[in-house]
Amino acid sequence: MTLADIGVAQVTRAVEEFDRLGRRAFLERYGFGPSRTYHLVVDGRSYDSKAIVGAAHGFLPGLRPLRPSEFSGGLDHAVKVLTDLGFRVEHSSADGTAIDTDRLVGRIAKLRIATTADGPRLYQPITLLWAIGRALRGEPRLLSWEETAAALRKLLESHGLRGERPRPDYPVLALHRAGLWSLEGYTGEVPSAHGDAAPHRWFTEQRPTGGLAEPVHALVAGSGRARVAVIEAIVDRFFDGVDEVPLLTEVGLYEDSVADDPDTGGPVADGPVDPVVAAAQYEKWCAAVERREAREGLRDGVRYRERTVRDPVRSGLARQAVLARCDGRCENPGCQGQPDDVTDRGKPLLEVDHVVELAAGGRDHPSRMVALCPNCHAVKTRGRTRHRLREVLLEVALERHRRGPLGS
């Protein structure tokens, strides 16, 4: 017998044993470690998918449980067994509940994409950006297939600039296989994103609900840092030679709030900050700002896009860098004392401002931006001494940028 002989009854018995023994005892009994990527979800509970399949094999007549070395837990093996039987499998991190920004960016870099002479096709990038925009607005993670298909057809017709057809089934199936998209409410096997008839027929018959995988959705909905990092990863890889602004605008990602966490204007620190990590992150933000600036410059002697005075994505990246750099304190050296009060999330009352306004030739870059308390911001904006203060703040911004976060 093979993995294909495992049925719903065997998986169910393995799940029941998992519940009875508890996770640690179950994994120890069968010799498995925790699942790093895929988790079986039954009635809202998470199970280590490979261990469940290995144990389920032992419930087949006359057979023993499989050892970890005897089969793979990936998409073509344990995951396929479970999804073919109609079970739900989520792509997640080692704890089954979350995924960090670097891992998500890494997965985006590894997406399998069809290419043309002009560059990679935009099916999956368009779909991801649409879903991230929904997450930013706090909209439900899962949508009916009819709603998903209608929205994606419209976007593919408007922004599919490399010959993409208005076929939303292609990117959804590809992202599902990559572990970035959840499909629910179907039976049997999910087809691959190939051919015309099979994908269309499957969605017509099954009509699943779907959306970003739960850990991915939670990350991009709750973390401004993650959101802008993912947007930049998508833009850098897929939109070379294509103006992404119309698409970002339509899906709601070309907004001032794109880099903000919910109910806060800046990053949320969890405990002490490692100076080396902080410096590396600051450099990443600055590099991303400069990449967006470069996208508006000359390419092969031809201006790619007219200079955009206001770029919320670029500004959001720069704001994040400044807030990390200022260590929670007003950057005006003459500050008479910023308010002791904090935001609802315990963050300092600080506002990031351009020393020279964009309309006057300023730059969306940490070297030209400062974090100010409300009092100093008011002086800088409309105080009698504002002209002298701006001169001081420009020197401060340059020096703070040179030093980086935490004086590193």
Image (tube, helix red, strand yellow):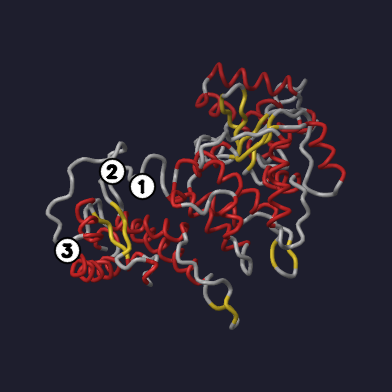
Report the residue at 69% width, 62% height from top.
Answer: 120
Farthest residue, direction left: 336
First reached walking from the N terminus: tag 1 or tag 2: 1
- Of labels 1 and 2, the one closer to you: 1
> In the rendered view, does 168 fall on the left or right side of 23?
right
Labels 1 & 2 near each other (Cβ < 8 A): yes
Counting other residues with Cα less than 10 Å from the Cα at mark 3, is it few (<14), some (14-19), or many (20 or more)?
A: few
Tell me the residue that label 3 is attached to. Answer: 384
* Residue 116: % across, % down: 75, 66
Per the model, the C-alpha gap separating discs 2 and 3 is 29 Å
Helix, strand or loop under label 3: loop
- Give the x, y percent position of residue 268: 35, 45
Amino acid on which disc 2 is placed: Lys
Residue 246 drawn at (x, y percent): 60, 58
Q: Left or right: 62 with respect to 327?
A: right
Q: CA distance from mark 1 to mark 2?
A: 9 Å
Horizontal arrangement in the rendering, residue 340 relative to residue 272 (left or right): left
Q: Is residue 364 above or below residue 326?
A: below
Say which mark, if any, is on residue 265. 1
Q: Looking at the image, which is closer to me, 366 or 96?
A: 366
According to the image, label 2 marks what residue? Answer: 347
Q: Is residue 221 above or below residue 106?
A: above
- The N terminus: image quadrant: top right
